[in-house]
Image (tube, helix red, strand yellow):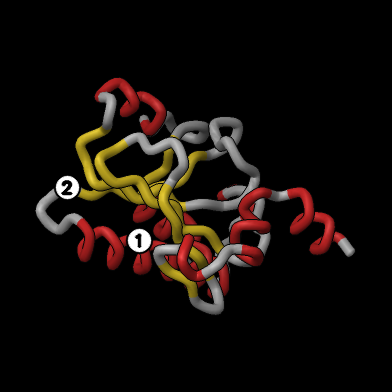
């Protein structure tokens, strides 16, 4: 019952379960990827789990969170950007509450530079409330 409510009210759950393959950059049994509707960089993709996980704070030191929630998402994002824009610098990470805009875990995948340039401020690492690099999150939740 709770899962159905999350899917009906969460915009990213709707994207994960109701999108056509044409609107997605990647889809598999665990994640989907698509272009951010309000990009902050030359390329700005989002990778989300199909399972509704609200934020990075819901992740724990366990194998399933490590392998699905971050490791697989990061692999997908790295593959997409290396195919799309191999010549640019890449950055990967997550917003931590209260800085997250959607309560569904999502990995930001950037091919830099930021556009416009001031948008970098949204992705500053500010300890426990800012943006956390994907590799740092992996270290934090490694079982």
Query: Among all residues in the image, which is located at the extreme right?
Result: 1
Q: CA distance from mark 1 to mark 2?
A: 13 Å
Q: Quadrant of residue 123?
A: top left
Query: In percent of the image, x 35 and y 55: which residue is there?
Result: 135
Q: Is residue 115 visible?
A: yes
Q: Which residue is mark 2?
A: 89
Q: Position of residue 122 (x, y in %)?
A: 41, 28
* Left or right of 8 on screen, residue 30: left
Q: Position of residue 107 (x, y in %)?
A: 45, 52
Q: Residue furthest top?
A: 118
Element type at mark 1: helix
Which badge, 1 or 2, comes first in the chain's sequence? Answer: 1
Q: Is 52 rendered above or below residue 41?
A: below
Residue at x-position 75% and y-position 58%: 7
Q: Quadrant of the N terminus?
A: bottom right
- Which residue, given by chain and number where applicable, does mark 1 sit on? 77
Asked if residue 143 can be seen in this view, the reply is no
The outermost residue toward the bottom is: 29
- Say which residue appears at 71% left-offset and 50% top-offset: 10
Question: How many numbered circles does the render carry?
Answer: 2
81 relative position to 2: left or right: left
- How packed mark 2 is, by other alpha carbons closer than 10 Å (few <14, some 14-19, many 20 or more), is few
Foreground residue, 138 or 16? Answer: 16
Residue 100 position, x and y percent, is: 56, 37
Question: Picture coordinates of residue 26 (x, y %)?
Answer: 42, 68
Picture quadrant of residue 40: top left
Is 23 located above or below residue 115 in the figure? below
User: CB under 8 Å between callouts 1 and 2?
Assistant: no
Q: Secondary structure at mark 2?
A: loop
Quadrant in the rendering for residue 61: bottom right
């Amino acid at each position: 019952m709770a899962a159905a409510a999350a899917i009906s009210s969460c915009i990213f759950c709707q994207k994960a379960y109701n999108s056509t393959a044409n609107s997605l950059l990647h889809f598999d049994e665990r994640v989907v990827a698509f272009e951010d509707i309000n990009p902050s960089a030359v390329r700005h993709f989002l990778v989300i789990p199909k399972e509704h996980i609200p934020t990075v704070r819901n992740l724990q030191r366990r194998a399933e969170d490590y392998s699905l929630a971050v490791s697989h998402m990061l692999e997908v994002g790295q593959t997409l950007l290396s195919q799309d824009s191999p010549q640019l610098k890449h950055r990967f990470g997550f917003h931590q509450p209260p800085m997250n805009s959607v309560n569904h875990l999502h990995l930001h995948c950037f091919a830099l530079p930021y556009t416009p340039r001031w948008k970098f401020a949204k992705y500053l690492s500010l300890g426990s409330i800012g943006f956390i690099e994907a590799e740092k999150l992996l270290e934090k939740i490694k079982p």
